[in-house]
Amino acid sequence: MITLSRTLGAPTIDRRIYGQFAEHLGRCIYEGVWVGESSDIPHRNGLRTDVIDALRQIRVPLVRWPGGCFADEYHWLKGVGPDRQPMVNTHWGGVVESNEFGTHEYFELLNQLDAEAYINGNVGSGTVAEMQDWIEYMTLDSTSPMAELRKRHGREQPWKLEFFGVGNESWGCGGNMLPLHYANQYRQFQTYVRRYGEHPISKIACGANADDYEWTETLMARAVEHMDGLSLHYYTLPTADWDRKGSALDFSDFEWHETLRQARRMDEMVTRHSRIMDRHDPTGRVGLIVDEWGTWYDVDEGTDPGFLYQQNTLRDAAVAAITLNIFHRHADRVRMANIAQMVNVLQAMILTDGGRMLTTPTYHVFDLYTDHQDAEYVDVPIGALGADVDATASYKDGAYTVSLTNTALDREAKAGFALPAAVTDVLRAQVLGGTSATAHNTFDTPDAVVLSDIAVSVSGDEVTLTLPPHSVATVRVAVA
Ligand code: AHR
């Protein structure tokens, strides 16, 4: 039986790995989080109470906004003050965006979640001056044209802006740029992301699409000294085919395993992008920011193809767990990640239907993993807890947290591990499972897939448990 123990110099698992992404896309912002001040749906300052309360439970550390592709056609001035100016959301369904939810509403969302800000700026169709003004509007605490405008709009104090992304997918929807062209654009735009207040703003450069290592090489070679983070986008498609992504609910055993295999490719990409970063940034100052990840299937039948609405099963739970385990393993370089997306879009935490809401299996994985946030990484060699088991562990406040995913569809997995000292208390032992891999929650049966207690047997410093097929569990134990 393997002993899981702390190692000298182990990295901390940054809580920001549990970040969320909320774009003006489909029903993520409107209905998903924002219902407006005059809605019958219970809300606080226009933000729906049920969704906020559920998100607080999983301790959302930060929210990336307003896109995504939307970011590179977003003109922030249209979304502040009493006269909001509508626009067309060309990327996502061609619908009219009212701009009712803008900068002030975003910071109110963060305030209610107790989360940090990560705003993505517009390089694709915006100007340097527009970006600079937005930074001044949000962060300058004195008399200036933009600070005065903010005050006239009802906000006296500046906000704290922790992270600012300079463009999104600039190699694609954000401007179709070539790497060197974007590197130059980045150098120019980031110059005007000024530090007005006492808090520095961490600048994130747009990084690669999946395994585009040339992009990373160029950005690191040409602009490393100007960035605090470099992003990476990678989505898990069951067969890696963008023309036939496959169904979220109706999948075969083969597709289950294939999807998990595609999810595991994240490890190879993070490893190879990190190697390039190591060469240009040997001290590891620049973070790898995986600010879009998750599953992407065909949209639910009958829904707008531009709204990217999909259901969420135990397969998504397994993808979430496997991916978070990879981020833990690379905690020295991966400092932030943002699952796409928070509500009603792609691999969502929450789905809504008018006033109704449900939490997804992915949400419950984030719940199971809350104790890993800001904990010390504890290495679990791949396969050490069983051939079918994908596991991760961490240490915080005198207790070890071990999370285990049984990836087998047709058999239980008996898993056991030892700790460096005797177990004094079992603080948490819960599992997420269901009768089949396609189990999911619906608005009529919102509690079909929820957490339940799992039996754990403890003998001295040893812990054993039996995981049901296609399940994710967490055991947290205090040690002497
Ligand atoms: O998350 C949906 C879209 O996927 C984002 O807008 C874009 O950045 C990516 O291609």
Image (spheres, grey):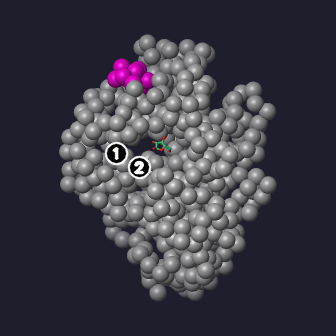
Q: Is mark 2 within 8 Å of ligand 1?
A: yes
Please name the predominant secondary structure of the magenta segment in the image. helix
Which residue is disc 2 drawn over? 233
Percent x, y of residue 30? 64, 34
Would residue 165 be found to the left or right of residue 475 on screen?
A: left
Indicate whether residue 129 is drawn in magenta.
yes
Magenta-tinted stretch: 126-136
Q: Residue at x 53, y 17 (%)?
A: 151
Q: Residue at x 57, y 35 (%)?
A: 93
Q: Amino acid at mark 2?
A: His
Q: How many marks?
A: 2
Q: Which mark is residue 207?
A: 1
On whether residue 280 falls in the magenta region, the answer is no
Tell me, yes or no, whether the two marked residues, 2 and 1, touch with CB atoms within 8 Å.
yes
Front residue (pair 359, 254) = 254
Q: Amino acid at mark 1?
A: Gly
Q: Is residue 351 visible?
A: yes
Q: Which residue is situated farthest in the front direction here?
A: 243
